[in-house]
Amino acid sequence: MRIYGRIARFIEGLGASFGITALRISIGIIFLWFGVPKFFPGVSPAESLAAETVERLTFGIIEGTPATVVTGALETVIGLLLVSGRLPALTTMVLLGHMAGTFTPLFMFPKETWESFFIGTLEGQYILKNLVIVSAAVVIAGHSGKRQRPAPAEPVAGTPALTVLETRRQRTQSAAGSRLVTAPDRAS
């Protein structure tokens, strides 16, 4: 069990140190992977579905190859912003807006996206994987804003938060003998 604990702590530390960055970059690579082929007619497997969706959503103003190129350009910009880490709030907003558009074929083109009830076609599954991307974007956004937030205030004597901290310290102190272990001690 010691090896398991060491491995678990190593993975937790790795996740705490690099997890959000790795998530952001990997989602960016996915956006580039799906976006860049849309610049080249006949290369993207999602080309026709993307063109039909954009055409329907723009009421026919943008159609065919231009619709696919616009989609590819948007995905490429989102990918580059994610990989670079620049403008995280704007990137998240654009990404979530784009994701809302990617889910529309599930409702607009049910014959192309569903084989039967809750059984997606390959195109439907391609779209449904975006749920993970949406979740990842929310996590990334939640962590990118922490740099600008002020540190939480210290608990005031008599408040439930301080009582919980005092109880934890007492338990830790009795378990560790006379040495008092606090959160900052464990981090160092």
Image: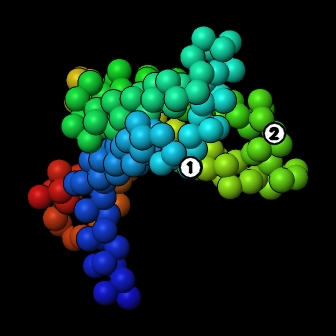
Q: Residues within 10 Å of mark 2 (few under 14, many from 20)?
A: some
Which residue is under mark 1? 45
**Residue 3: percent from left, percent from top:** 31, 87
Give yes or no for contact between labels 1 and 2 (Cβ–Cβ under 8 Å). Answer: no
Q: Nearer the viewer, mark 1 or mark 2?
A: 1
Q: Which quadrant of the figure has residue 161?
A: top left
Residue 109 relative to residue 104: left or right: right
**Residue 187: percent from left, percent from top:** 18, 56
User: Which of these two is toward me, 150 or 71?
Assistant: 71
Which of the labelled discs sits on residue 99, or is there none?
none
User: Which residue type carries mark 1?
Assistant: Pro
Say how many tags the image has. 2
User: Which residue type carries mark 2?
Assistant: Pro
| Residue 167 visible to an observer of this rendering | yes
**Residue 65: percent from left, percent from top:** 52, 29
Q: Residues within 10 Å of mark 1 (few under 14, many from 20)?
A: few
Which residue is under mark 2? 110
Q: Which residue is painted at 56% across and 49% down in the image?
A: 45
| Residue 164 visible to an observer of this rendering | no
Q: Measured along the vertical axis of the image, is residue 69 above or below residue 3?
A: above
Q: Which residue is painted at 65% across and 28% down in the image?
A: 53
**Residue 2: percent from left, percent from top:** 32, 87
Q: Which residue is painted at 17% across and 51% down in the image?
A: 184
User: Which of these two is toward me, 104 or 61?
Assistant: 61
